[in-house]
Amino acid sequence: MRHHKRLEPEILEAVADGFKVLAEPARLAILNVLRKGPMSVTTLIDETGLSQANLSKHLQLLHTHGFVQRQREKSWVYYSLADRSVFSLCEIMCAQLDRHVAVKRYASR
């Protein structure tokens, strides 16, 4: 039998906050675009179609929660992924959703 480490309420709260950040499609789109590599805000606007104000709001939240990092070069700020493992989480979720849809299709026959 596997023993699971008990997570403290503070840890659970932090994990829930991280999931809340990822629960926004625009933020997932930003992370997906950043898979290509570091990008300026101007490039991210072009790639995502978001307004500058909206993009900045999402980038700030992603940065605060450790999903992206930023680097200043002269008058430009470049954003990049802080940790690519977020995509492992997305792949797990997509696989789970695929299984759920398959089960629902089978059950509705």
Image (tube, rainbow, N blue to C red):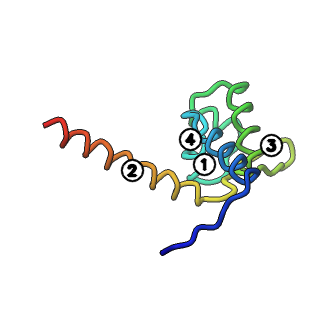
Disc 3 versus disc 1: distance between alpha carbons?
A: 16 Å
For image coordinates 69% across by 34% down, the residue present is: 58
In the rendered image, which residue does mark 1 sit on? 34
Looking at the image, residue 92 sits to the left or right of residue 57; the answer is: left
For image coordinates 69% across by 42% down, the residue present is: 17
Of the image marks 4 and 1, the number of the one nearer the N terminus: 4
Q: Nearer the viewer, residue 49 or 14?
A: 14
| Residue 80 location (% of width, % of height) | 68, 52
Above or below, 45 relative to 78: above
| Residue 95 location (% of width, % of height) | 38, 52
Looking at the image, residue 86 sits to the left or right of residue 95; the answer is: right
Disc 4 versus disc 2: distance between alpha carbons?
A: 17 Å
Q: Nearer the viewer, residue 45 or 67?
A: 67
Q: Quadrant of the C terminus?
A: top left
In the rendered image, which residue does mark 2 sit on? 96
Badge 3 crowding class, 10 Å Cα cut-off, few under 14, some 14 to 19, many 20 or more, is: few
**Pointer 3 with pointer 1, Cβ within 8 A:** no
Q: Nearer the viewer, mark 4 or mark 2?
A: 2
In the rendered image, which residue does mark 3 sit on? 76
Amino acid beneath label 1: Leu
Amino acid beneath label 2: Gln
Amino acid beneath label 4: Leu
For image coordinates 29% across by 42% down, the residue present is: 101
Of the image marks 2 and 3, the number of the one nearer the N terminus: 3
Above or below, 52 relative to 71: above
In the rendered image, which residue does mark 4 sit on? 28
Above or below, 94 relative to 6: above
